[in-house]
Image (cartoon, rainbow, N blue to C red):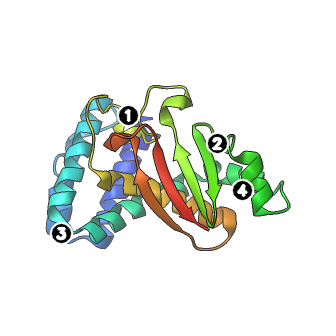
Amino acid sequence: MAKRRLRAIDNLRRSLERSATEEVRKKVLEGSERLDEGSDPAQVARWVQGAMKRLDDAAGKRARSRIMEECGAACAQANPGTIDRVIAKRKKYGNLEEFLEAEKDTLLPGMRLEKKGRALYQYYMPRSFGRAGRCFCSLISGLPPDETISPTYCQCSKGFAQRMWERVLGRPVKVEVLETVLTGAAECKFRVYL
């Protein structure tokens, strides 16, 4: 898990290099050099919490959303097994409607789906995943239960969900973050425009 945490911080670093000025990158990454494979999960989570605050202060909403969405896309690329499992399930059904109906409660552990009109609602329920976590991301597994994090962080999950559904459907999709556990909701909710 520790290597995964460090890889996620490297993803943030690369995303900042592509989409932010050097000044913003330095500000956001301040203190990251003190994190290593032996860092305590609470220490990592507090650093991420601070990094998101610094990103919010240093960049506009569109820029910081893009930065975090890129992190999610990198995470999707680094964890293809999750998406490959969904694609394999999709191939079992003749059409999208059959797939969504059959898999609405069992697509992946800790996830459920709901289709309404031309939108798919994807719910993440990390607490039902067999651990007390509030997010599937290892970077913030140590965030104290009474603390929240900037909604900017959850744009990472948006990027992951977007890449997943684009691969499953074989076409571009738009994803919108509606609510998240890390910002105080009971579960994470994303709208995927079909």
- Cα separation between marks 3 and 2: 39 Å
Q: Name the residue under label 1.
A: 141
**10 Å crowding of disc 2: few (<14), some (14-19), many (20+):** some
Label 4 amino acid? Ile
Does residue 23 appear left or right of residue 73 in this picture?
left
* Residue 193 position in % (x across, y down): 56, 67
Q: Do the residues labelled 1 and 3 touch (CB within 8 Å)?
A: no
Q: Mark 3 points at which residue?
A: 22
Residue at position x 61%, y 44% from top?
112
Element assignment for label 3: helix
Element assignment for label 1: loop
Element assignment for label 2: loop
- Cα separation between marks 4 and 3: 38 Å
Q: Are marks 1 and 2 in contact (CB under 8 Å)?
A: no
Q: Name the residue under label 2.
A: 108
Mark with earlier residue (1, 2): 2
**Closer to viewer: mark 3 or mark 2:** 2
Mark with earlier residue (1, 3): 3
Relative depth, front residue between 95 and 46: 95
Q: Do the residues labelled 4 and 2 touch (CB within 8 Å)?
A: no
Label 1 amino acid? Ser
Quarter of the rendering occupied by the C terminus: bottom right
**10 Å crowding of disc 1: few (<14), some (14-19), many (20+):** some
Label 3 amino acid? Glu
Q: Do the residues labelled 4 and 3 touch (CB within 8 Å)?
A: no
**10 Å crowding of disc 3: few (<14), some (14-19), many (20+):** few
